[in-house]
Image (cartoon, helix red, strand yellow):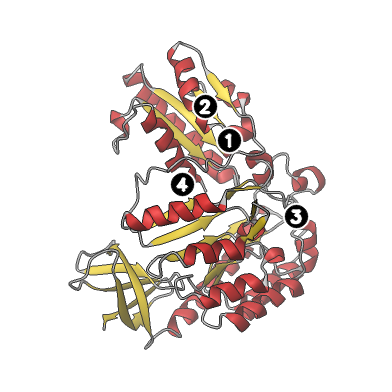
Amino acid sequence: MNFSDSEIVASILEEEGYVSTKEIKDADVIFVNTCSIRDHAEQKIRKRLEYMQSLKRRNSRLVIGMLGCMAERLKTQLLEEEQVLDLIAGPDSYRDLPRLMAEVQSGRKAINTLLSIDETYADISPVRYDSNGISAFISIMRGCENYCAYCVVPYVRGQERSRDAASIALEAETLFHKGFREVTLLGQNVNSYTWTSNGVKTNFARLLEKVAVMNPLLRIRFATSHPKDLSDELLQTIARYNNICKAIHLPVQSGSTRILEKMNRGYTRDQYLDRIYAIRKYLPDCAISTDIIAGFCDETEEDHKETLSLMEQVAFDYAFMFRYSERPDTLAAERYPDNVPSEVKDRRLREIIDLQQKLSYQSNKQDAGKTFEVLIEGFSKRSDAYFSGRNSQNKVVIFPVTGNKPGDYIRVKIDRFTSATLIGEAC
């Protein structure tokens, strides 16, 4: 979401005559787009601001602003704590950046962190300033109303609102004609997308179909799905279209029903597994990834073992794994003590990571000998003698350079693998 927001900000500023630079030392304006999901992310930002202070000493005209969730969460407190900052803008305030910049240039600090009930930036065409020219993000909704106990997003992103379905389809079509061959539809919970126009209601399954039928050469991905809202209708839609990628990110967070209830996730272990069985039924070749939190409040060793057993039962293809980090103002911070010792969190996280590496290796091992259609994204990071791309299951595939170019589809037979990568030959 932050990457998509940065592209929106770039578009707004370009309209005002600003030009982007890849060299931070050449910049007269630096905006830091921030995340508040974990404390580690915020601490990295504060360290980054220390470096920017040194840049400001060399360039007294340099304007430094903070955007996004951290700006929304801390607001005016940041201006007091981080003297280097000239400007603060929350996620719904990007249209106001030209006015805020004018205020800074008149010698005052500027701030706008007002949340909106209808801002989606639907009419702004994002600047794809750091894109490979092949893959792009399309934001389809903003905000969240799930209020998971550990999560700060509803407080810094505001209430859920969907974007006009026609504008989403138009953006996807425009990107295709510009040469892009893959779009990822983004939202905090894409499954709850809904838009009504002229009495016709479009849910996420119908939106996905609307984008898929535009051109079979445009691949569609999406993130993120909430387990409680993942419908059979959506899975059937994915199954009908080859260009809707067979990869679903379905965060579980914990394998223990007791902890899931404490997290306010809205489903039990069995209900989550029911959605996994539905995916396997309608999409037998679908890759499934997840998010897992280690050491949430009151998590016992038995709860932890239930998470490990669920991982083995599902056999996730890959996962994003974190130790619990208490966030101020969340339900968990107000109600539950962060009472799992740090060393226990670290050990449990290590066990989760170790298990997932085995599961990812096993998943890739099963792909040996198979042939996949791969969208070429560019050269491999390690060698210009190899292309890198992804298959429908969102797995990275490396293969020797052919006469093709980025943006082409190519069939690749897999003959080697690691826990993170498939390696093969074009066929």
Q: Please say whether residue 308 is visible from this viewpoint.
A: no
Q: Residue furthest left?
A: 403
- Callout 1 environment at 10 Å: few (<14), some (14 to 19), or many (20+)? many
Mark 2 residue crowding within 10 angstroms, few (<14) / some (14–19) / many (20+): few
2 vs 4, front mark: 2
User: On residue 96, which mark appears?
Assistant: 2
Q: CA distance from mark 2 to mark 4?
A: 19 Å
Q: Secondary structure at mark 3?
A: loop
Residue 378, visible in the rendered structure = yes
* Residue 351 tag number: none
Q: Position of residue 60 (x, y in %)?
A: 36, 16
- Distance in Å between CA atoms under marks 1 and 4: 15 Å
Q: Looking at the image, which residue is at 44% across and 26% down?
A: 64
Residue 92 is tagged as 1
Name the kind of residue labelled 1 in the image: Asp
Q: Select label 1 or label 3 by which is in front.
A: 1
Left or right: residue 261 versus residue 25 is right
* Residue 244 x %, y %: 48, 70
Q: Which residue is mark 4?
A: 3
Pointer 2 with pointer 4, Cβ within 8 A? no
- Cβ atoms under marks 1 and 3 closer than 8 Å: no
